[in-house]
Image (spheres, helix red, strand yellow):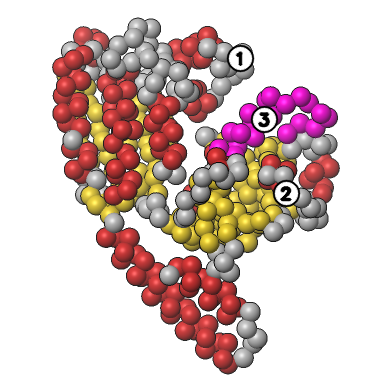
Amino acid sequence: MVISQAHVLQMSRDLEEGSFAEEMLAVLDRLERNTRSLQGQIMNICMIPIGPMLHQYHRVVRDLGIAQGKKIELVIRGEETEIDKTIVEKLNDPLKHMIRNSIDHGLESIAERLSQGKEEAGTITLSAYQEGGSIVIEVADDGKGLDKEAIIAKAKKLGLVGKEELGDEQVHSLIFRPGFSTSESVTDLSGRGVGMDVVKRNIEALRGQIQISTECNVGTTFRLRLPLTMAIVDGVLVHIAQSHFVLPIAQVEECVELTPENVEEAHGRYYFSLRGKLIPYIRLREYFDIEGEPPFIEQIVIVGVEGERIGLVVDEVIGDVQTVIKPLGIGRIKAENFSGATIMGNGDVAFILDVLNVVRRAQDSERSSIPRGNNR
């Protein structure tokens, strides 16, 4: 229904000016409102309270606390928050991993807590709330916080980083690397190098994001930001030559022009200056090997990826669009670059870009490539 309604609306815009066209546009506006209302009601049917899922972790926390000799209280907030049942089914394992991580790495032993003037019982808080068009779930503990020095030392030992200075967000992202663990001994809970990388992969599969905030001897909070539904995505429609792509609007920060002057100032490097800050960019035309010449003035969509701002260069930004997600068929070339596809109003197919994977693959390609005169 959404696709058909968009098709009719697009056709109406091609009509010549006149009373008939104005009347038809008025009718279509009313149809769009009714369609959105029906869509919202159907989506509400798919929503269920998150409380029952969160309450099942009382036993997990109790059993792990006994196994580790720690006293732990589980606090649940926002249990009436509703979420798509499809997402709930896929959240169980990631949340369990995060709770296990908080108990093992975050919360101190009873003796350590008492020596620091804390209550002997540690607290893990699970919170859920809606923020804008997203559902936010937080897993917080009042433990010792992330040990930045230990993380950096282990990362250097594994060859993941060099001698460069790392910001907090870059350090935090290291714990999501496959095989990474700061535990010196292997137990049922930690030291095996599995867990948090699985969490990140599962959350990204749900088109979600993870943020970390931590403070020494105060605690750590893992914040999951997830879409309200898996069926429909709000995005920004762009095109390159005859190809159309949709970028999830949750990751888009702003759109700006890339002029020949900007390119000339960078002396062949894929950077441009925005309000005094250098931002690297990826030319999607080159990334996807799309033939043809770009327009005289291109446009850049600025996206936020793991605390960094990256530009994606396209021919033109068409505008906001609400799309119905269709899964990709098997055998699709470079399918890892897309989280799905959608049918536009005129019947054409637009691919929904997996922004995080595109940026990662472009960065990996840059690191492994031999310099050829320009630095991407």
Residue extending furthest toward the front: 331
Callout 3: SS: helix
Could you tell me residue 178's position as x and y percent? 47, 22
Mark 1: few, some, or many residues within 10 Å (few <14, many ≥20)?
few
268 shown above or below 238: above
Mark 3 residue type: Ser
Give the residue drawn at x 34%, y 70%: 38
- In the displayed structure, 128 sits above or below 319; it is above
Residue that label 1 marks:
162
Instruction: Return the residue at label 3.
Output: 365
Residue at 47% across, 55% down = 326
Name the residue at 43% across, 27% down.
Answer: 197
Which is nearer the eye, 257 or 319? 319
Image location of residue 157, percent across then percent down = 52, 9
Q: Where does the N terminus fall, quadrant-wise?
A: bottom left
- Bin the neighbour count of mark 2 within 10 Å (Cα to Cα): few under 14, some 14-19, many 20 and up: some
In the figure, is residue 355 to the left or right of 192? Answer: right
**Residue identified by numbered label 2:** 290
Of circles 3 and 1, the one toward us is: 3
Q: Nearer the viewer, mark 1 or mark 2?
A: 2
Badge 3 or badge 1: first in the primary sequence: 1
Q: Residue at x 62, y 40 (%)?
A: 310
Residue 313 relative to residue 351: left or right = right
Q: Quadrant of residue 215?
A: top left
Q: Which residues are magenta?
A: 357-376
Is residue 123 in the magenta section? no
Q: Which element type, helix, strand or loop, lies under badge 1?
A: loop
Label 1 or label 2, whichever comes before in sequence order: 1
